[in-house]
Image (cartoon, rainbow, N blue to C red):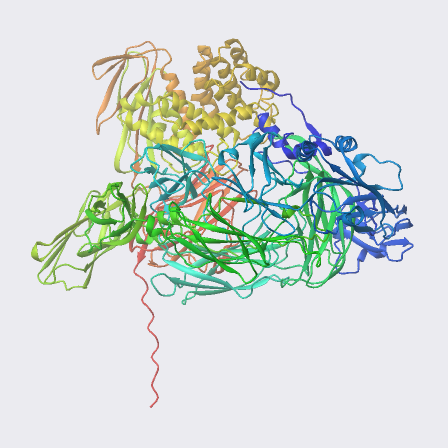
Amino acid sequence: MLCMFLPVTRLSIKMPRISALLFAMGILLAPAALAAQEGAPPGAAPPKARAENRPFELTGVEIAAERDRPQACFAFSRPLPRQRGRTNELARFVSVDPAQGVAITTRDQSLCLDGLKHGQRYAVTINAGLPAAGAKERLAAAITRDLAVPDRKPSLSFRGQGYILPRVEADGLPLRGVNVDRSRLTVLRLNDRALVEQLYYGRSNQTMTEFEIGDVLDQKGERVWRGEMAIAGERNKTTQIAFPIDAVVGDLAPGVYVAVAEDAALSFQAWDKRATQWFVVSDLGLTSFRAANGLYVFARSLSTAKPQAGVELRLVGRDKRELGRAVTGADGLARFDATQISGNNEAAPQALFASTPDGGFSLLDFGAPAVELVGKGDGGRLVAGTADAYLFPERGAYRPGDPVWLTALLRDADAKALAGQKLTFKVVRPDGLEVERRSIDDGGAGVHVWRMELPANAPSGRWTATAHLDPAGPALGQTIFNVGEVAPARISFDLTADRTRIGPDGKVNLSIDARYLNGGAAGLLPGEMTLTLRPTDRPRPGLDGFRFGLVQQSLAPEKRALPGFTTGPDGRATLNLDLGKLPDTTRRLEAVLRTTLHDVGGRSVEQELVLPVEFQPVTLGLKPNFTGDAVPEGATVSVDVVAVSPDGQKVGRSGLTWDLFEEEYDYEWYAADGRWEYRTIVKDRRLTGGNLNITPGQLATIEEQVRAGRYRLELFDPASGVASSLRFSAGWWVSAKLADTPDVVEVKVQEPLHIPGQKVRVFIRPPYAGTVAIALADRAIRHTLISEIGTEGAFVELPLPEDITAGAYVLATSFAPADPGSRTPPRRALGMGWVAIDPAQRSLSVSIAEQPPVHPRGSVKLPVAVAGAEPGSVVRVLVTAVDESMAHLPETQPIDPVGWFLGKRRLAVEMRDVYGRLVNHTEGSAAAPAGNGGDKTGTRISSVRRTGPITALHSGVVTVGPNGQAEVNLLLPDMAGRLALTAVAWSDAKVGVARGTLEVRDDIATDMILPGFLAPGDRARIALNLENLSGPVRGAYKLSMTAEGPVRLEGGKAETSFPALARGRKLSINRTLVAGDPGYGVLVVNVTGPDGYSLTRRFPINIRPAHAVAATQVRGQIMPGQTATLAAPKPVGAIAGASWKLSMVSPHDTLDALTHLLLIDAWPFGSADQIAARLLPLAGANEWQKALGLPANDKLKAKAEDLVERLISRQRADGAFSLWAHDGPADPWLTAFALDVLTRSREAGFTVPEDGYRRGMDWLARSIGNSWVEDAELPARAYGLYVAARARAIDATPLRFFQETFQSRVPSRLARAQIAAAFAMLGDGQRAGDILSRLDDPLPGVPGIRDFGSPLRDRAATLALLIAANADPARIQAEEAALVGMLRDPALVATQERAWLLLAAQALANNPPALNVVVDGQTVTSTGPLLRALADGAALSVTNRGDQPLNSLSTIAGILSTPDKAESAGGLTLSRQFKDGKGRPANLKSIRAGDLLVVVLEGRAEQPLTGPLLLIDPLPAGLVVENVRLAGSAQLGGLSWLGTLSEAALVEFRDDRFVAALDGMPESGSFRLVYLARAVTQGNFTLPAARLDDLIDGSRFARTAAGSLTVLPPAPEPTPPTIPTVP
């Protein structure tokens, strides 16, 4: 049921601080989530912000006093000129009194006075004439302000987040103060252990307020010490001192304490105004390892680093319930069982509380993140659960329509087979939409094999397949493969630059070196290049974790056109590039230079080169000391600051300023195009700031304590205008995420491979002498050891369990005691090493016996041997065979189950300890873990034409015999080449793989160079090449070549004899091939030779129509009692091949239905609305098709379901439909049309994918559930309501709302009829009748309607709806009469117009009166029309025995062999020119093989058009189209004469035609598109006409003249000049 909402224009949601915190936790829904809940459809982009009408003026003044050096900022209504250098050009417009030490800086819309003094008054004047950025506006009048800079507010805070104070003469707690002379300090001890835990949970879950905590301390806290301490410091400056607890309090007993600091000048302060720090005085250090087999805890002394025995451990969950207890042994170790830590949600472990017999106490927080191990040796593949699947395809690249063989080996975490399970495969297309799902049974020992057919129009890109045990659960395995019109690459190239980075001048020189893979320079090949300038967060070398640029400054990637190029004869090209003006941004930039090199007859290859663009004199980096983007409430945020020169060196920088802002978010809702959207408005409040100097080669640090909220830290360099910022939030919902990077223990595993059950020898060297805890772990802790090791290192031996799978990690944690003498706190270091298990122990030894060359067109049995299986096990094997060229594509990854199951795995053990919580008065930011950066280059798949079939074979599962042998049968197609073989074998406990090759060829190799297609009448010069590879050498050979089907050899059968054919000898035989009528012909080659040798090969040839289907019709009328003879009319020209001759007699007008039925598929290329239109009439066409002898029943169903699949491929991931591709913009009317057609198809019994249909209906429901709609979209809303009513997805409520609210504003007659029909479907005939009675009321004029409609389409669709709604017969007759008056030549009717005319004719056929005729002497009475197919030369005699005139229609359709050579047009013009590479007209009578032609297509419209246009230019058979997208792309260097080219919504380079789609005519009223074609086949060929069609109104079209083209042999190589010799 749909929910309707009242229309609201704008809604503003203010987010106060507490709401912002709830918002961050998801407790308040984000606007996007609200929109989703309210049913607002996705899609609409927010409207452009309204332009500011206010003049350039002052908007506010802010004084930032909460910083060491105060600042006053004047905010203006426009941005100010950006500061360049240390002298600000705006300073001359500003006067300050007193001016001593004051500096002027500008940032965006603010002019700031830096260097002010606290407690000082200033008179400031900003003079008239102050310019805004761009100098187009100036300040109209002077501004004068008197400013009073106050002192900073007194404040106290404890610095840092540590809460464990070691009992080792620590320096104490660091305390910071501002404008506080003396601090009153109190130390409280909490003796109640339950109260400690209550406070811990209160602080971690915020169930207690600061006031509640204060009450607890007042009532339960035991005062240990109270006193005052002086805080000596400069006025208004931050002063940090250490509160020396041990010195003033004495030796504190172990326990939990709270330190409270308050201003001694005040008699009382509320608890939320005091500074508090709770801490644990403890000598107890804890380290835990959480693994699959339990929780291991190591307790030790922080003072001595020795193990602590007898420590009681309590594990507590999030719900405060105790999960278990344990006591440490003599080695300090204790273990909790896996069941005690396996809880989820509230039952998950939250904390570990430890206590010693002498009162010692400590705790470990499981809410905090684990110690980061990346960069310490961890790596490999993560096996997350108990099940694992290796999923692989037989290759990595496919064409649309190809089969994909997906194979999955399902195993447990120990790589043992999980047999008897069902595995669900999911296939997801590039936009993330799941298109296929299949549950596959076990094929034996955990193997699951699925042969999936890709759709014939599968979108190009990276497809993903996943395997799931639970269809709704996570993927156990995943593989990625590419889909596109692929061909094996024949070329490669290197792309290099003359510098490693691009400087401020924006210049770089690029070099290209291209070569063929089989050797030789790839010369004279065209290429194109694009440049994308984009912001980058790629870490700079040695500066991992630093962030550069203003985070609040968005910068979209900017694509720029670059000149193209052509490689020289040596395959090289050089490009001197100038990036031009760079964006004005603070963000770091990188230039992405993507180069495409095009190969004729092969695959285009791409290379990408990424270069940093260093356009700023210095960059400022910020690196937080916390991970993620949030810190706990009350945390002290520490951020490192660095200044970096363009060459990457750390440089000094003085005079930097920093500011800390609190950000508040407002969300303003607005309605746009009938959809609710929102925009985020960020308001900031400056909290504090300061000045900063950076020493060359060093880092500086900014520290500040924050309460709950959202923050932005901003750093600015007044001298250069460079700025950087970072955002973070603080709140109770955040666990402390300290950037705690431990020191490193050196861990070296001595042997590369190991055997389970033996010992592993490991060298361990800690950075300091002390206790080392050693653990052997994979997903479980396998062994533990405590050892004392000095800094010189030592060898240790660890036992490897028998059941270890891939390997394990040696974890070494070294602990060092505190050193009071050097004031060094307790430390720990961590290291890890990988112990690899020899995979031979768990692998099967597989081999494919080497085979001699085999013949194609038959089967081959491959002997596969498997050894090493466990006794008594069943071994199975499968073999894939793929064209070797395809196997070597970058997309094809080697099949390797051994590496998957037995290779290195990521550590699945979590480590936590207390060291990140130790209080350290010298605490600083830790170094971030090391990472790898760098540019990535690679070759990507490109859409190119087909170059013949690709061989990819899959044997299926074969059982290996007890002797370890198997014969795998492969059925070979007609091919010649090498196949890459991969054999995968598996048993219950082992896997194996082997590779090999198989050469497939005939003894006498025959190769025919044929064009991809021919047209009737074409004459192509073909060559048959023979080579004796391994056939007999002595004796005569005879060769014959014959033609079958609609093709012939000039001169008849070709026969040739030769007395002998020596080994390696090559022969070439040339003939002329003549094409007949459209269809498929075959060239049969037969070779016979000595010793009974015989070879027969069949080469198919496609004879493609050169011209579109044309129809001729005759309409007539048979009066009562009259007899008429119906015969096929004479076509306008000779028809090539078969023709269709049909007749129809009906009491209603025929609406030219038979002609439209034959012509609706005339243009198979098109948009989603064209596909849907072709599908629309099929739901009710079966009886007509049968009567007319056209495909019916199963054939009609197959055709309909093919169109359904094509239509679904245009569906977006959100369920809506897009015109040209699945990733295009959603179109509401088109979506309703597509779902209407799919609904009718379901009703007719055609198969419609349930997932796609349901998603579409969901999108439609969300759309019509939104009450806000623009008038131009009312037709789409009306159609959506009709479709939902037809599908019974709504009741009448939304229809009534629409009628009452919008009916008078509906701008379309068809939309009115659709609402009436929807009411009729839901049983409300009265409302339907009321709407139909006003159907012809004047329509309001509304611009911008996009409903793909024409008057003819609307009238035909309305007639069909009226009949379906059982409207008044008189109204139906009137509608029919009006429609008949609008009929036009069927050749000038668009596809959607045809579809609705057919639907109207089908609806009329079932309306009275009945038909009563005599046909060829037989009486026929029926409620429908008379439909007959006419035989050649036959006629039909029809006598009208009724009392009403009858209408007749006879039509003939076929492909004309000689179309009109003249151009024709209706509202559009189109011209086609063939030029050479220099822009000169090409002589189509003397094109040479190898010539490159530039085809220029230009069109114009007589009036503005906004609907889709489709341009189709069929190729002559002698040409192949190049894959260089010139439609809207960068110009090729040598083709600059082309000028400006138009953008196209879609460009396709097909085998036999160039297709381009335009979303309306450009504003100029004309377009120019260009493609390149190369002459490859010699001969004489038909040049078909190019055609431009308006897809909405068929009367608007243009057609060029047809012609012919002759391709001659290549021009002879010029003879080099003779150089005379010198006597």
Q: Which residue is at the front of the view, 486 or 1445?
A: 486
Residue at horizontal 62 percent and vertical 49 percent from the top: 740
Total of numbered circles in the picture?
0
Q: Which residue is at the front of the view, 536 or 1009?
A: 536
Query: In the drawing, does residue 513 fall left or right of residue 923?
Result: left
Residue at horizontal 79 percent and vertical 35 percent from the top: 272
Instruction: Check the picture and name the quadrant holding the C terminus.
Output: bottom left
Q: Position of residue 1456 (x, y in %)?
A: 30, 39
Q: Which residue is at the front of the view, 1214 or 127?
A: 1214
Q: Is residue 1191 visible?
A: no
The image quarter in which residue 1606 lies: bottom left
Q: Position of residue 91 (x, y in %)?
A: 83, 56
Q: Position of residue 238 (x, y in %)?
A: 81, 50
Q: Position of residue 111 (x, y in %)?
A: 80, 50
Q: Is residue 406 visible?
A: yes
Q: Residue furthest bottom?
A: 1623
324 in relation to 1475, above or below: above
Query: In the drawing, does residue 942 fall left or right of residue 1293?
Result: left
Query: In the drawing, does residue 1541 fall left or right of residue 822?
Result: left
